[in-house]
Image (spheres, helix red, strand yellow):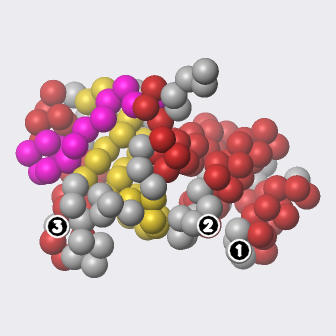
Amino acid sequence: WVRNKKKLLAMKVNADTAELYLNNPNFSPALQTVMVEALESMNGVSNRELFIKVSLQASDPDIARTITEITTMTAGYNKNISALETLSPVGRFLYATAKNGNVVMIFPADHVLYTERVADIANWLVEPKANKATKTKDFELWIFGDFSKRAQTELETTGWQLHPGSQNNLFPKQE
């Protein structure tokens, strides 16, 4: 606990926010350590503390695990795919902007359906007014599982590059 707090403070996470995160009973010490290590590995990515702020919403251990998985997937993207520049909020989620200008969304989803919420977030991010400041090149969506046919069609039509089954890319096996 103390070690994770020191690391969060070194990352310039607000002391009160770090304290609230570390005292959230839905995050086990193991999840906290994994998440803090993932955040630490993204040194140079601005707004890393947004993951901690999102974590304050975790109302049960499953949500805490999901937030931790998104954090580790994002760290894996930063290390193994393309360097990230910044993290930004969208709804209750985060998206990343890579140094190459791509907008990146990452979820540990098994199967993505095309719902109104998915459509709203996907469409908002590709709107010119939303991505004007970032000079977005491409839009990437990385998940562990797959997409329904409708989700695949609609998202690709909107301009998203889909990356199903991404765990081997985000977490390559060590040799």
Q: Tell me how far mark 2 sits from mark 3, CA to CA.
A: 26 Å
In which quadrant of the rendered view does residue 4 lie? bottom right
Task: Judge whether residue 25 can be spotted in this image.
Answer: yes
Q: Tell me how far mark 2 sits from mark 1, CA to CA.
A: 8 Å
Q: Is residue 161 magenta?
A: yes
Q: Mark 3 or mark 1: which comes first in sequence?
A: 1
SS type, badge 2: helix
Farthest right residue in view: 2
In which quadrant of the rendered view does residue 161 lie? top left
Q: Mark 2 or mark 3: which comes first in sequence?
A: 2
Q: Amino acid at mark 3?
A: Glu
**Label 3, on which residue?**
127
Q: Amino acid at mark 1?
A: Lys
SS type, badge 3: loop
| Contact (Cβ within 8 Å) of mark 2 with mark 1 | yes
Counting from the top left corner in percent of width and height, residue 92 is at: 45, 59
Q: Amino acid at mark 2?
A: Glu
Q: Is residue 45 left or right of residue 164?
A: right
Residue at 30%, 58% (x, y): give it: 102
Q: Tell me how far mark 3 sits from mark 1, CA to CA.
A: 32 Å
Residue at 61%, 21% (x, y): give it: 175
Counting from the top left corner in percent of width and height, residue 77 is at: 46, 45
Label 2, residues with CA under 10 Å away: few <14, some 14-19, many ≥20: some
Q: 37 or 111, which is in the foreground? A: 37
Residue at 16%, 67% (x, y): give it: 127
**Label 2, on which residue?**
49
- Point out the stretch of residues depicted in magenta: 155-167
Q: 72 or 78, which is in the foreground? A: 78
